[in-house]
Image (spheres, rainbow, N blue to C red):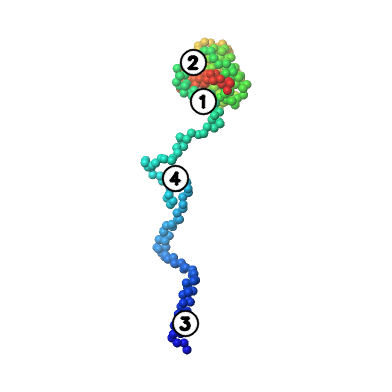
Amino acid sequence: MLGLKDIVKIFAVVAAVVLLFAMTTEFPSVPTPRPVFYGSEAKAEANIPKVKAIKKTSRKSLADGVKIGETPVSKANRTPDKEEPKAGKIDSKKIKPKTTAKNEKADPVRDVYDESRKVAYTNLGKKEYRIMATGQRTVDQLAEYLLYFNPNIDATTAYLMAGYYVDESENEGVNHDIAFCQMCLETGFLRFGGIVHPSQNNFCGLGAVNSSTPGERFPTRRMGVIAHIQHLKAYASKQPLKGQLVDRRFKWVKRGSAPTVDGLAGKWAADREYSLKIKSLLYRLDLSTRNYLSNR
């Protein structure tokens, strides 16, 4: 039979073994159970905001001075600050684009033409440009002028039209430079596109009011040019026509009421700048000669 001392020894050995086993063995941790809510407490649990993990900002944000965890400043949430430093910011408007091959090949003649309208309102406003006068440009210069601003038409048409205007203007004593430039203004350098159709051979908008009343119609281009020249002479002079009357609206014009280009505004067209626009084209025609447009 075991004595008390033997029992104590056995208990001590068992305790030592259990302690050693506990120290050398890893037990899985038991998670703390989440409290369960009922009734109004369940609603309170649903309203608890969920905490999201803070994402790190990109290198671009850090380069812009945004710290990790901050909300990047945008145009929507930016607060104006007059003392905000502008160092390091680049104004895109001040950056000049690099010169490309296309810019290097820009047409200097056209660049000068772009300023012609401004010049027309200053210098050319002082020049009268009498309609009953002798034109200075040749057929070649008029044709190349037309082709320069409308390269889509064929050269034959350009030279024929230039020839018609020179011949018919000289026949009636009209300045063919003015008549030709007026044609370019009215037709957009023979592009048309308005209420007058190219098939009408109406090169100065005679009788054109709207889409229902597109204006006069002539069987050939030459007759359309003759009608234009006759209508100009009706405004500029009281002299009788030398050729057969083609312009059916000739009788409605107050003879001699517009001896210069300036007088056409408000009479030929309601546009108050009508005369200045013709002068602008005359100035461009002058530039085409002085800048050797034919040798471009």
> In the rendered structure, which disc, 1 or 2, sits on the residue that comes first in sequence?
1
Closer mark to the observer between disc 2 and disc 3: 3
Give the numbered dot on residue 64: 4
Q: Residue drawn at (54%, 28%), measured in percent from left and top? A: 106
Q: Name above or below for residue 233 compared with residue 73.
A: above
> In the rendered structure, which disc, 1 or 3, sits on the residue that comes first in sequence?
3
Q: Say what amino acid the circle numbered 3 marks.
A: Ile
Give the numbered dot on residue 129: 2
The secondary structure type at the circle numbered 2 is loop
Q: Residue drawn at (49%, 17%), measured in percent from left and top? A: 261
The secondary structure type at the circle numbered 1 is helix
> In the rendered structure, which disc, 3 or 4, sits on the residue that comes first in sequence?
3
In-front residue for pair 171/217: 171
Whether the residues at callouts 2 and 3 have beta carbons within 8 Å, the answer is: no
Closer mark to the observer between disc 1 and disc 4: 4
- Distance, label 4 to label 2, CA atoms, is 64 Å
In-front residue for pair 83/208: 83
Q: Which residue is mark 3?
A: 10
Q: Which residue is mark 1?
A: 111
Q: Say what amino acid the circle numbered 4 marks.
A: Asp
